[in-house]
């Protein structure tokens, strides 16, 4: 009789434990979106504030293994044009535009930040301000991109 009573207690406890662990697993997965990379973009003091029209910022991700000039993905925003920190970012599939969604997701990137003089996508143009970092791993945090060069 005692074993049957214990069994009645253990089965519901086991079922509740499984349900609780399932809920915990699902919520942890849901709370951690896929992040391609995160970090900050700074504008070099040497470039100053002389070109206030450069307020459109593009962050482009290139597959480090690919020789194609086409980026894997891009992000566009507007920033104030003052030397120092321009933006903290976390690039996810939800906030970037992936150029070819069927393409294999790269594991290493070349990342370019560009303050665009015209505010339009495309190749670098005279007057654009750029900075690049290389060999960035997918999911890497704390990436610092310094815009330090004028095209």
Image: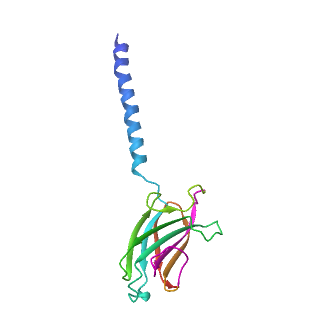
Specify the farthest residue to the top: 1
Q: What stretch is highlighted in magenta?
A: 104-125
Specify the farthest residue to the right: 67
Q: Is residue 102 above or below residue 5?
A: below
Q: How is the protein colored in the picture?
A: rainbow
Q: Nearer the viewer, residue 112 or 73?
A: 73
Residue at 43% in and 83% down = 44
Relative placement, left or right, of 66 versus 18 is right
Q: In this view, does 151 lie above or below 104?
A: below
Relative placement, left or right, of 22 versus 101 is left
Residue 18 location, x and y as percent?
41, 32
Residue 117 location, x and y as percent?
45, 82
Q: Is residue 102 rendered magenta in the image?
A: no
Residue 99 location, x and y as percent?
55, 62
Classify residue 68 by image quadrant: bottom right
Classify residue 41 by image quadrant: bottom left
Residue 16 location, x and y as percent?
36, 30
Q: Nearer the viewer, residue 94 or 7?
A: 94
Quarter of the image where the N terminus is located: top left
Q: Is residue 123 rendered magenta in the image?
A: yes
Q: In this view, does 16 lie above or below 143?
A: above
Q: Which of 100 and 137 is in front in this view?
A: 100
Residue at 38% in and 33% down = 19
Count of marks, rendered view = 0
């Amino acid at each position: 009789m005692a074993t049957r009573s214990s069994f009645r207690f253990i089965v519901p406890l086991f079922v509740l434990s499984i349900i609780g662990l399932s809920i915990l697993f699902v919520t942890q997965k849901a709370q951690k979106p896929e992040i391609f990379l995160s970090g900050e973009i700074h504008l070099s003091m040497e470039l100053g504030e002389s070109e206030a029209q450069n307020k459109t910022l593009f962050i482009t991700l290139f597959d480090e293994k690919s020789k194609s000039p086409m980026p894997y993905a891009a992000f566009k925003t507007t920033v104030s044009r003052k030397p120092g920190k321009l933006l903290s970012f976390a690039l996810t599939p939800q906030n970037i535009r992936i150029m070819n969604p069927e393409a294999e997701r790269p594991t290493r990137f070349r990342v370019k930040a560009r303050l665009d003089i015209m505010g339009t996508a495309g190749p670098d143009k005279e007057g654009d301000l750029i900075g690049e970092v290389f060999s960035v791993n997918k999911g890497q945090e704390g990436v610092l991109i310094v815009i330090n060069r004028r095209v």
